[in-house]
Amino acid sequence: MSRPEKILIAALAVLSLVLAGCVAQTKPKPSGPKTPENFHSLMPPQSLLRDDTIEAASHDRAQSRLAYVGVWAKSGEACAMMDQTAFEGYAVITPGTLRQPGETCAFDQGEPEQGYLQFEASCKAGRKSRTRQLTVYMQDAEKMQLGIDGTARSLTRCHLPE
């Protein structure tokens, strides 16, 4: 092998080692925070929510077995507006209360593990009081039909951010 060939081979060997070091030193890009499964129905942070909203959203339904308790809105996107702006189509439900636009109701706690419930509720809107008939039909853990005096609407469960 001639001297120029030896130099060329040595140069290629050094170059391959340098390139191998460059490849080994590249850092993988961070994957970033994982998107939660319920991102489409997240509410604002707890610091921006009313007390009954936090109570309803953090209620331990596994222990109480009251599936209807929670924060509900007409769509997952509406959950992001909870307690931030006035909008139609939400319900904040604790074991014995319901808050919806312009009205708060009190009722006797429902029976555990029931997918369909009826309540007679005492409701207040401003200074007016009236009795209303509430019905709850749980379609699944994330969807319900809420009926008030015979008019029903579909609602989606809202979730607290982690």
Image (cartoon, grey):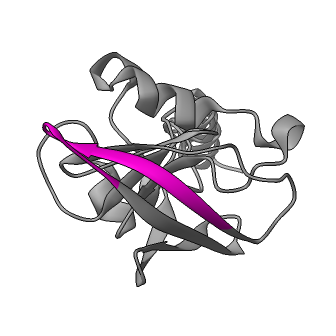
- Total number of numbered labels? 0
Give the residue at x 41% y 20%. Answer: 51
Let me know if residue 125 is in the magenta part: yes
Give the residue at x 48% y 67%. Answer: 133
Q: Position of residue 58 (x, y in %)?
A: 61, 30
Report whether 81 appears left or right of 119.
left
Q: Main secondary structure of the magenta part?
A: strand
As drawn, 153 above or below 44? below
Q: Which quadrant of the figure has residue 73?
A: bottom left
Q: Position of residue 151 (x, y in %)?
A: 37, 83
User: Which stretch is magenta?
Assistant: 118-130
Relative to the observer, which residue lies in front, 131 or 93?
Answer: 131
Relative to the observer, which residue lies in front, 99 or 121?
Answer: 121
Q: Residue furthest top?
A: 47
Give the residue at x 33% y 24%. Answer: 50
Q: Position of residue 31 (x, y in %)?
A: 53, 41
Q: Is residue 121 visible?
A: yes
Give the residue at x 70% y 64%. Answer: 141
Report whether 125 appears left or right of 12.
left
Let me know if residue 139 is in the magenta part: no
Quadrant (top left/top right/bottom left/bottom right) for the C terminus: top right
Relative to the observer, which residue lies in front, 162 or 112?
Answer: 112
